[in-house]
Image: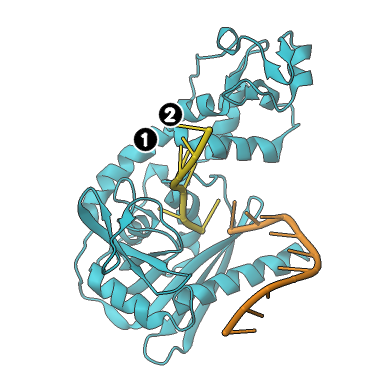
Chain colours: A cyan, B yellow, C orange
Amino acid sequence: MSRSRSISDDVDLTSLVLSAVAEVPRGMVCTFGDIAEALGDPRAARAVGEVLATVQGQGLNGHRVVYSDGRAPDAEALRVEGLHVVDGRVEGLDEVRFHGFEVRPVLRDLQREQEELRLQVVEKDGMTDHKKVTGVDIAYLGEEAVAAAVTMEAGSGKVLEEVVEWGRVRFPYVPGYLAYRELPMVRKAVRCGSGHVHLIDGHGRLHPRCFGVACHIGVSLGIPTVGAAKSMLIGHVMEGGGDIMVDGEVRGRMVGSGGKPTYVSVGHRVSLDTACHLVKRLILRAGPPEPLRMAHILATEERRRRSRA
DNA sequence: GCGACAG
DNA sequence: ATCTTGTCGC
C-alpha cells in the first residue's frame, strides 16, 4: 500500500500569507488580490482576507492591505504612515501600490503538482473490498481540526470502526486547493492497508485540474476513493440523467433527488458508475451518504466537546 | 454590474 | 467550513 508523500504535503500557507504581507513597506499598500497573485493564484484573495482577519493586531502590516477599489479596513493606521485616505479610500492607489513581492508563488507550484499527480488517477474498478465503506470528514475549531473516519459494513450498515484525530491546520480554504488543507488530517485518521472504498467530502475528477481532494487522497494513500460533494465547484448538470459536463466531457453525476443532492465524481480506482451505485445505496435519509453523515456528526460532536472543555 | 467560488 | 434564534414544515 503506497503512502507516498511529497514536499507540498505540509505547506504552511498561513505563514506565507503573513510573510507576503510583511514585505509591503511603510507608506505603501497592496490589495488582497495582489497578495493572492504573489502567492500564485488570484482566487486565494478571500483566503488572504480570512488569514488577516483572524491574526490582526500582532505587529504585522495587515493594515497595508486594502480592497481593489482602494477601501481600507484600517484607514487611520494608513494615515499615520503618510497615506492620503479620503472617505476610507486610499487616494491614487496605483501610485502607492507595492509590486515587488518576493514570496514564493507556492500555489503555482501546487497547481503544477496537481497537473502531474492527476496522471496517476485510475478511473476503473480494481481489486476492491466491497464489504466495507469508510466516510471521512473534518470539523474546524480555529486552527485546530478534528478528522473523523467512520467505517461501516456495506451490507448491514453496522459501524465497524470509528477514528478521531486532532491536529493543527495552517492552510486556509482556497477553492481548488482543498486537498492541501485536508490531506495532512486525513493521513492521521485513515488507517493504512485498507483496500475498500473511502467516501470523501469534496470532489474528485470534477475539479478545474481534474484532481480534487478525493483524487489526491486516493493517489497519495493508494486507496479507492469517491468524491461526494454537497455543492458544485465547476461544470453543468445535464437535464436528463444528471451527468455533469466539463469541456464536453462527463466528469461527474448528480445523485439523490430532492433539495439535497450529492455530486459524485471519481476519486481513484473506482468507475463513475460504481461510485454512483454505491453512493445511491448509502443514501438512507435525504442528504449525504450514511458513512459521510456519520463522520460529519462524529467530527462535529468531537469539536463541540473540546470547545466546551 | 452580475455571477461563481468543494470545505 | 463557521457564525447563530427562532421558526416553518412534514
Label 1 chain ID: A
Give the amino acid at mark 1.
Asp
Could you tell whether A68 is left or right of A9 in the image?
A: right
- Identify the residue at image location x=40%, y=52%: A233
**Quarter of the image holding residue C4?**
bottom right
Give the amino acid at mark 2.
Pro
Could you tell whether A93 is left or right of A154 in the image?
A: right
Residue C8: x and y in percent read 68, 73
Q: CA distance from mark 2 to mark 1?
A: 7 Å
Label 2 chain ID: A
**Quarter of the image holding residue A98?**
top right
Name the residue carrying label 1: A109
Residue A195 shows in this picture: no
Taking the view exactly as shown, the residue that stands out farthest to the bottom is: A156
Question: Cβ–Cβ below 8 Å for labels 2 and 1?
Answer: yes
Residue A280: x and y in percent read 36, 78
Using the image, determine if residue B3 lies above or below residue A222: above
Residue A206: x and y in percent read 32, 55
User: Which secondary structure, mark 1?
Assistant: helix
Could you tell whether A35 is left or right of A309 in the image?
A: left
Task: Please state which of residues A24 and A234 is positioned toward the viewer in this rendering.
Answer: A234
- Identify the residue at image location x=32%, y=78%: A278
- Identify the residue at image location x=61%, y=36%: A49
**Quarter of the image holding residue A204?**
bottom left
Task: Please state which of residues A103 and A259 is positioned toward the viewer in this rendering.
Answer: A259
Name the residue carrying label 2: A105
Q: Are marks 2 and 1 on the same chain?
A: yes
Could you tell whether A204 is left or right of A157 in the image?
A: left
User: Which secondary structure, mark 2?
Assistant: loop
Residue A234 shows in this picture: yes
- Identify the residue at image location x=66%, y=23%: A71
What is the number of callouts on the image? 2
